[in-house]
Amino acid sequence: MRLLIITAWYFPFIHPRAHRWTVLAEHWAAQGFEVHVVCARQDNCPPRAMVNGVQVHRVGFDSLKEVVYHWARSSNARGRVGGGVQRPTVGSRMAAWLYKVIWKNIFFPDDACLWYFPARRKVLDLLKEGTFDGVISVSLPFTGHLVGLVAKRRHPDLRWVADIGDPFTIQAQPLNNTLFYGRLSRRLEKKILEAADGVAVNNPAAVAAYQATFGAVAQKIVVIPPLLHPGMEEEGPEVSGKNIFFTPLQQTVLQIGYFGAFYAPVRTPDAFLDLLEKTFDLYPEWRNRLQVHFYGDIFPEFWEKLTRQPAIRLYGLRSRREVRLAMRQMDVLLNIGNVTDFQLPSKAVEYFASGKPVVHLSYLENDPFTAFWGNQPGLFEVKVEKNEVSEAGVRRWVAFLEAAQKGIPVFAHTEQTGRFVAPAVGGDYLELLGIKV
């Protein structure tokens, strides 16, 4: 069996799509599949290599930003593992402004458009070399699906699945210039739904959103859940006997960890910062009893807000191993919900399986994270209205912090985790491809 995966982001890139598809590709390779991945190039990675049994083809750049970093040979480029979090420079702020004002109004369909032609050439070359039993294209970026569409048109008998990690046109903020491209974007996304043999999303609310927008053609969409990444139980609590924190970890202080990025306007730290300020105003003693650790890329527009709060520590992008170990050392995990009701963060299942209590800031009546958690214990929900938490909500939150027993999800200790591991999730995709193992 031969499989081809089209995804701009793949290992060692740090991104939910890269994490998911690296695990699945390596799982299938271990089963005896011949797996090829076409992804964007990365400096210090060869154009073609066998990586853990997977044949990885790196072509083109996934964004204009990566082109600039490459030619400038930048040693402190944003989005790199281990770089920490630095004050945005005048140059980085200017670059961000130019991106929003000029480049975002030009590119189509998204900022990975530069990757389209190199990826297209490589995919068509691979299809000429031999027959594949299935092709999977991954979004975001949506550009990957356009490459999959070309492959399907050139080879109509090819079985193609479009995996929608995030929607394209159904967004709180458009991903491109809707004045120029709005109708074209909608037509293209509908064309993907029509042409693909199978379409997958990671939660039922996304299916409902697509059906409301695109009608009957969206009925083919199926839900394939988030992936629980391997290794949580296999690794010890320390790396080389050292605590992984880069700032002192006080044993008498409650440690709260947030793992992920912020993307305005879908997910911002504003309501949580409001919660902290109100907490410290009403309960000053908590200023010395609480530390909050943020693991993930910090975009320039959030840097000042986050660094003004002394209780917050920023670590930037870290390896998956460091993130898992940091998660283990937290007393409480923090999830900041989306303002959209059709997006479920991929970390939901890892939070669920962590054995840690989780605080969830919810902006929605029908919240997909809350629905995913279900009736399991261990979730404390804080309601957000108009980007603020009420005084009553603050008092409930402080009572939760002070509670000796905060509850943990029993899910972490049951067979329910089986439906989120690579064999089950990978099996769902193979079923969509019509492949029987």
Image (spheres, rainbow, N blue to C red):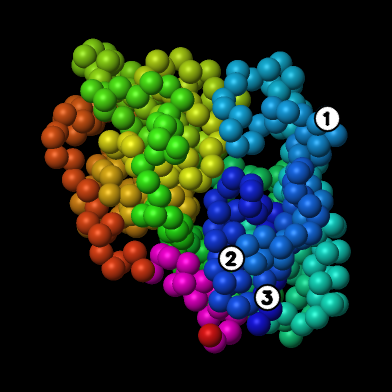
On screen, residue 242 above or below 165:
above
| Residue 426 painted magenta | yes
Quickly name the residue at label 3.
Answer: 34
Mark 1 / mark 2, whichever is N-terminal: 2
On screen, residue 187 above or below 300:
below
- Residue at position x 28%, y 15% from top? 287
| Left or right of residue 306, residue 177 in this image | right
Mark 3 / mark 2, whichever is N-terminal: 2
In the rendering, at what x and y percent does residue 432 appear? 56, 78
Tags 1 and 2 in contact by the CB under 8 Å rule?
Answer: no
Disc 3 crowd rating (10 Å Cα; few below 14, some 14-19, many 20+) is some
Nearer-the-camera pick, 262 or 83: 83
> What SS does tag 3 mark?
strand
Residue 66 shows up from this direction: yes
Q: Which of label 1 and label 3 is nearer to you? A: 3
| Left or right of residue 149, residue 290 in this image | left
Furthest residue in direction left, as rendered: 404
Quickly name the residue at label 2.
Answer: 26
Quickly name the residue at label 1.
Answer: 72
| Left or right of residue 199, residue 63 in this image | right
On screen, residue 103 above or below 126:
above
